[in-house]
Image: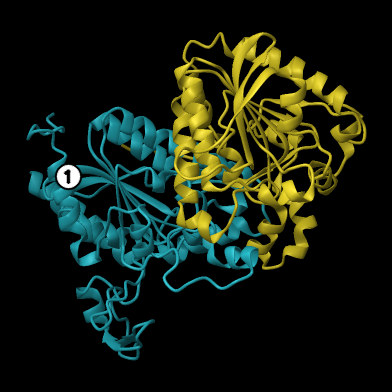
């Protein structure tokens, strides 16, 4: 990585949450041509917190999927500040099915604090909707590349991120829960979030070391929002290369299953061998 | 000879149940220990023998108290069929989280468990199964690397042996102390049970109190059949988080087993007394035209 190595984790969390941070809406404008947005879960609603559609990436059709926070307050509220509802995850599921049906690679862009914790969200099966996305991604026969753009919060982020390759912006964070939630659960004190940041191993460098992600996308000094055009050039080049590589996989589904099957196995103690 | 092995297995399971040290199952050590234990809900005075005989369900109000993993297996598996899988598989401390190692060691001493999940091979109503049980006394049944691995291995064992898979869930979700690696176990377990199901395997998820967070959002909600214990709390976000987000108190019965059944996420709410018979019936119904799938 670059000269930005020394940035502390808490600062990265702040950078990842920067309001002007490039996300899936920017990706649609800069990386893809002829983009067509698909809306609705075909069950009851459309959740704007998830963006789904088809576009051309250097001339070849791909399915694009991502979480978005919205550009102004009105959009922020409609998107629950980037926290998808079950309707959002079921729209994502629809996009995954179509990627499979039409043989299109799937590119996902993740920036969410987590899935929306609301009464209706629970009544409509938030857990079941996320589980369905995980299950579907594990069997897709097309290549899936996921990019953690800003916040990768909890199961709500993983629901779009079971990639053959998982890339991560240099100042993005990806964690089991937000640092505030983490501090609140473990110490009953969300004001200790700063302390949590230091412990959680949520930065791109940490996650590369833990082999949770495969590649870090360098950002301009000061963060991706200071020079989005430069950052998108980096993303574009990385995605082209990763896609070319992923398309050579004989069995992308099996590759993905193996990738996640190995997660954390370096930290197991087997004891004596059993049946 | 077979009888000898069966008797040995049964002794083993009884010993494990006893080691769980669960009141009221642990033998009374002295006359000074109380004979009665109040029901946590209706406060009826119930003797320890009554709790024991009634599978930890209050005879007065029907309240289901939590049961340990081995105890659960002893209630559901045919006598003498319990064979534990991966009994010594544990995780370590990937984040070097302060106090985590000591906490694990203490829990291992107190509960007799090695980790929050126990997996086993056995029979229910004569039909072979692979069973996994999460135990809420061990770090709230939370899923870290070891729990995720045990669930994945159970699904693989079921696939290999062509046996149905039954998972008794009880979990606070992903284990915070193992950070992102706990989150990744959601992907691992979801993929493992999905692969098993796609090969034609029957997966029954039995949700017990509480089933929340990353466990709900992965393998718990992926069953071919989903059962739940009465009044079990089942959800993704915890009630406290939701109340804070929406700024109002939640309705009575919200996120309980009955509520999930009403909203279409649970096939049946099954009281503990009927658990074994219901599972045996479901296993019989999935024997594929009477051809035993376990024919070896």
Q: Which residue is drawn at 67% across and 51% down?
A: A80
Q: Which residue is drawn at 73% across and 32% down?
A: A25
Residue situated in front as seen by the camera: A79 or A163: A79
At mark 1, the secondary structure is helix
- Residue B31, visible in the rendered structure: yes
Q: In this view, does A212 lie to the left or right of A221?
A: left
Q: Compared with residue B245, is residue B160 higher up or lower down, i.e. above or below?
A: above
Residue situated in front as seen by the camera: B154 or A194: A194
The picture places residue A42, in percent across and down from the top left corner, at 46, 37
- The chain containing the residue under callout 1 comes to B
Q: Chain B in the picture: what colour?
A: cyan
Q: Which quarter of the picture shows residue B294?
A: top left
Q: Mark 1 points at which residue?
A: B283
The picture places residue A177, in percent across and down from the top left corner, at 64, 51
The picture places residue A163, in percent across and down from the top left corner, at 58, 27
Q: Is residue B115 left or right of residue A197?
A: left
Q: Chain A in the picture: what colour?
A: yellow
Task: Categorize mark 1 by other alpha carbons within 10 Å: few (<14), some (14-19), many (20+).
Answer: many
Q: Is residue A247 left or right of residue B116?
A: right
Query: How many numbered discs sit on the rendered protein?
Result: 1
Q: Compared with residue B19, is residue A168 higher up or lower down, i.e. above or below?
A: above
- Residue B124, visible in the rendered structure: no
């Amino acid at each position: 990585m670059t000269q930005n190595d020394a940035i502390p984790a808490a600062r990265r969390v702040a950078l990842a949450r920067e309001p002007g941070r490039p996300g899936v809406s920017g990706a649609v404008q800069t990386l893809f041509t002829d983009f067509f947005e698909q809306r609705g879960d075909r069950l009851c609603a459309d959740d704007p917190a998830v963006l789904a559609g088809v576009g051309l990436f250097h001339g070849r059709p791909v399915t694009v999927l991502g979480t978005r926070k919205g550009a102004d307050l009105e959009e922020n509220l409609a998107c629950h500040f980037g926290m998808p509802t079950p309707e959002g995850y079921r729209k994502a599921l629809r996009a995954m099915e179509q990627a499979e049906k039409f043989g299109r690679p799937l590119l996902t862009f993740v920036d969410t604090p987590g899935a929306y914790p609301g009464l209706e969200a629970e009544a409509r099966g938030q857990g079941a909707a996320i589980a369905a996305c995980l299950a579907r991604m594990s069997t897709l026969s097309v290549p899936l590349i996921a990019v953690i753009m800003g916040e990768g919060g909890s199961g709500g982020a993983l629901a779009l991120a079971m990639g053959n390759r998982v890339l991560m912006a240099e100042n993005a964070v990806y964690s089991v829960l937000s640092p505030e939630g983490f501090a609140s659960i473990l110490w009953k004190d969300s004001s200790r979030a700063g302390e949590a940041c230091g412990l959680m191993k949520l930065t791109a460098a940490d996650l590369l070391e833990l082999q949770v992600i495969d590649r870090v996308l360098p950002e301009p000094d000061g963060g991706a929002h200071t020079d989005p055009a430069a950052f998108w050039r980096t993303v574009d080049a990385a995605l082209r290369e990763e896609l070319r590589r992923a398309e050579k996989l004989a069995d992308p589904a099996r590759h993905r299953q193996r990738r996640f099957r190995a997660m954390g196995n370096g930290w197991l103690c087997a004891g004596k061998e059993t049946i | 000879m077979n009888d000898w092995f069966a008797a040995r297995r049964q002794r083993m399971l009884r010993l494990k149940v006893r080691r769980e040290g669960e009141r009221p199952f642990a033998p009374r050590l002295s006359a000074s220990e109380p004979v009665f234990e109040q029901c946590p809900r209706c406060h009826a005075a119930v003797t320890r023998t009554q709790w024991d005989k009634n599978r930890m369900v209050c005879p007065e109000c029907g309240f289901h108290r939590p049961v340990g993993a081995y105890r659960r297996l002893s209630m559901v598996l045919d006598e003498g069929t319990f064979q534990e899988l991966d009994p010594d598989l544990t995780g370590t401390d990937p984040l070097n989280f302060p106090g985590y190692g000591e906490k694990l060691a203490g829990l291992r001493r107190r509960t007799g468990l090695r980790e929050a999940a126990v997996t086993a091979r056995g029979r229910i109503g004569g039909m072979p199964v692979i069973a996994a049980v999460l135990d809420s006394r061990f770090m709230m049944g939370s899923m870290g690397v070891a729990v995720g691995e045990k669930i994945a291995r159970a699904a693989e064992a079921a696939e290999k042996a062509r046996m149905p898979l039954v998972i008794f869930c009880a979990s606070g979700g992903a284990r915070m102390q193992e950070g992102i690696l706990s989150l990744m176990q959601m992907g691992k377990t979801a993929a493992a049970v999905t692969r098993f199901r796609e090969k034609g395997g029957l997966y029954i998820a039995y949700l017990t109190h509480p089933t929340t967070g990353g466990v709900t959002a992965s393998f718990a909600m992926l069953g071919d059949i989903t059962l739940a214990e009465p009044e079990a709390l089942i959800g993704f976000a915890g009630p406290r988080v939701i109340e804070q987000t929406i700024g109002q108190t939640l309705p009575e019965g919200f996120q309980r087993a009955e509520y999930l059944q009403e909203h279409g996420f649970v096939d049946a709410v099954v009281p503990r007394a009927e658990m074994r018979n219901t599972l045996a019936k479901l296993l019989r119904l999935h024997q594929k035209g009477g051809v035993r799938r376990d024919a070896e």
